[in-house]
Structures are given as structure tokens and as C-alpha cells.
Image (spheres, rainbow, N blue to C red):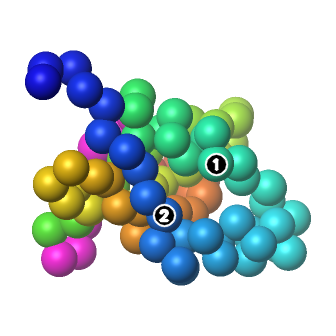
Amino acid sequence: MAGRVKPIVFSRHAEAKFGILRKHGFVVHRETITTCLRSPDKIDTGYKGRTIAQKAIDKEHVIRVIFEDIGETIRIVTFYPGRRERYEN
């Protein structure tokens, strides 16, 4: 089935990350994470063969989403904001 969009599942840690970041004053929405996965600005290879999708979210920040492509689903391991100056060059 070409063009089929795989479902995205969030690990327990990724689910908890929304609250952790909110406590630090950085609000991230699920839509931001899924948009990053569906249309990233950049893709990197991460630890243990995981993939990192990156997307600019404002003038100063990117969101980096660490995920695993597991057969029929995409599993988000974690995500974090970063400064564009660090990750875009």
C-alpha cells in the first residue's frame, strides 16, 4: 500500500515529556511532534540506530524527535527542544 501513513505511538517517557517540558515553561503539542515526523527539516541517525527528525518551531528553537520505525508503526522514544544555532549547521 504505497502512500499509507503509519500510525504514531508515544512511549511512556514521550508521554511524560509533555508535562516535564511544560513545567520548564516550554509547551509542546502532539501536533508539533507529529508534524515534525511527517515533514522534518532534517533527519539524523541517533543512538542504537534510532532516527532523529528535526523541525524548526520558532525563530530560536527546533524540536528533535527520536523515534523507531517498527514495522507497521512509528514509536516515539522521546523529544526535546534545542537551539537552532546548535542543530541547524
- At numbered mark 2, what does the secondary structure look like: helix, strand or loop? strand
Whether residue 17 is situated above or below residue 65 in the rendered picture = below
Residue at 85 percent across and 75 percent down: it is 23
Give the residue pinned by disc 2: 10
Residue at 54 percent across and 70 percent down: it is 14
Whether pointer 2 and pointer 1 mark residues with C-beta atoms closer than 8 Å, the reply is: yes
Between 32 and 82, the residue placed more toward the observer is 32
Q: Residue 59: x, y in percent?
A: 70, 34
Quick check: 73 left or right of 87?
left
- At numbered mark 1, what does the secondary structure look like: helix, strand or loop? helix
Quick check: 25 left or right of 44?
right
Q: Is residue 57 magenta?
A: no
Between 58 and 72, the residue placed more toward the observer is 72
Callout 2, which amino acid? Answer: Phe
Residue at 35 percent across and 61 percent down: it is 75
- Location of the C terminus (image quadrant): top left
Farthest residue toward the top?
3
Q: Where on the picture, by quarter, is residue 84?
A: top right
Alpha-carbon distance for marks 2 and 1? 10 Å
Q: Residue 63: x, y in percent?
A: 55, 50
Q: Neighbour class for label 1 at 10 Å: few (<14), some, many (≥20)?
A: few
Residue at 41 percent across and 50 percent down: it is 8
Q: Which mark is residue 59?
A: none
Give the residue pinned by disc 1: 30
Q: Neighbour class for label 2 at 10 Å: few (<14), some, many (≥20)?
A: some
- Location of the N terminus (image quadrant): top left
Callout 1, which amino acid? Answer: Arg
Q: Does residue 62 show up?
A: no
Whether residue 3 is situated above or below residue 9 in the rendered picture = above
Magenta-colored span: 40-48
Q: Residue 24: x, y in percent?
A: 83, 73
